[in-house]
Amino acid sequence: RVPGKIVKNLSKSNKEIAPTSYRRIWGSLFGKYLLLTNTISSGILMGLGDVMSQEIEYRTKLIEKRYEWKRVGQMFLVGCLGGPFHHVFYKWMDNILPKADVVTSAKKIFLDQTIFSPFCIITFFYSAGLLEDKPLKDCNKELREKFFTVYFADWLIWPAAQFLNFYFLPPQYRVLYINVLTMFYNVFLCYVKHTETTFFKFMEKREE
């Protein structure tokens, strides 16, 4: 039999090691391997957003099959492609605008909405379209039809969300925070991507 004192010491030692290990892993993920963390989390949360979107489409009878996993995989890849761009852009903004005050946060929001948001929308539609084997001509057409719908929604949602990001959060958590919010935003984004929904059609229905 192992003496009770030894068992107690081993138990105490394990309890001390576990939090230290978790802290070390967390520190590596959001330190040395931050780019990889941002890339993979972007892909996973984009894929989850598409799963949620497909569930809504299935329940509203827009699609017959509940989950199309190939489409989820495509959205995962789109998210992984976007992750490094988020990583680099937010790092660049934090370098040129290092303060965390109201004025600096407003400047970052302006840059995000006027430069990065249009870039992300364009990248999303082209990368998703090409992964679906759509000709470039069809990608151009889809972007023309749906760009304003997504950009309009961006202005409604992201300025307030980004203020919290830039004003309160440490830089290493910016992309993760955006990715978590984007998972829910991607429900809308994937819905627009895979249906005929546009801002103009929505307004026409309201007028009717």
Image (cartoon, grey):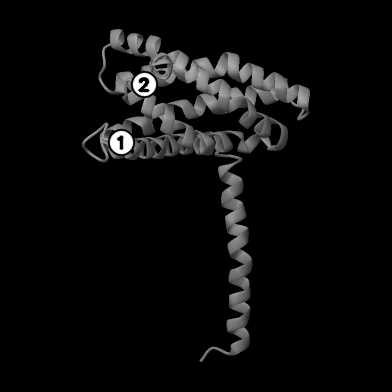
Report the side of 57 relative to 19 (left or right): left
- Residue at (72, 25) in percent of width and height: 105
As displayed, is residue 11 above or below residue 168?
below
Q: Residue furthest bottom?
A: 1
As displayed, is residue 25 above or below residue 164?
below
Q: Residue furthest left?
A: 64
Viewer-closest of 9 and 79: 79
> Which amino acid type is marked by label 2?
Thr
Position of residue 200 measured from the top left corner of the image (x, y, whole percent): 41, 13
Position of residue 148 measured from the top left corner of the image (x, y, whole percent): 46, 13
Element under label 2? loop
In the drawing, what numbered circle is on residue 197? 2
Disc 1 to disc 2, how far (Cα)?
14 Å
Determine whether label 1 and label 2 are within 8 Å by CB. Answer: no
Q: Quadrant of residue 192?
A: top left
How many marks the image carries: the answer is 2
Report the side of 198 relative to 179 (left or right): left
Q: Crowding at label 1, few (<14), some or many (≥20) Cα neighbours within 10 Å?
A: few
Position of residue 181 measured from the top left corner of the image (x, y, whole percent): 53, 36
Q: Quadrant of residue 165?
A: top right
- Residue at (56, 34) in percent of width and height: 178
As displayed, is residue 144 above or below residue 8?
above
Instruction: Give the mark nearer the N terminus: 1 vs 2.
Output: 1
Position of residue 116 measured from the top left corner of the image (x, y, whole percent): 55, 18
Viewer-closest of 135 and 192: 192
Q: Quadrant of residue 72?
A: top left
Residue that mark 1 sits on: 60
Report the side of 45 relative to 20 (left or right): left
Q: Crowding at label 2, few (<14), some or many (≥20) Cα neighbours within 10 Å?
A: some
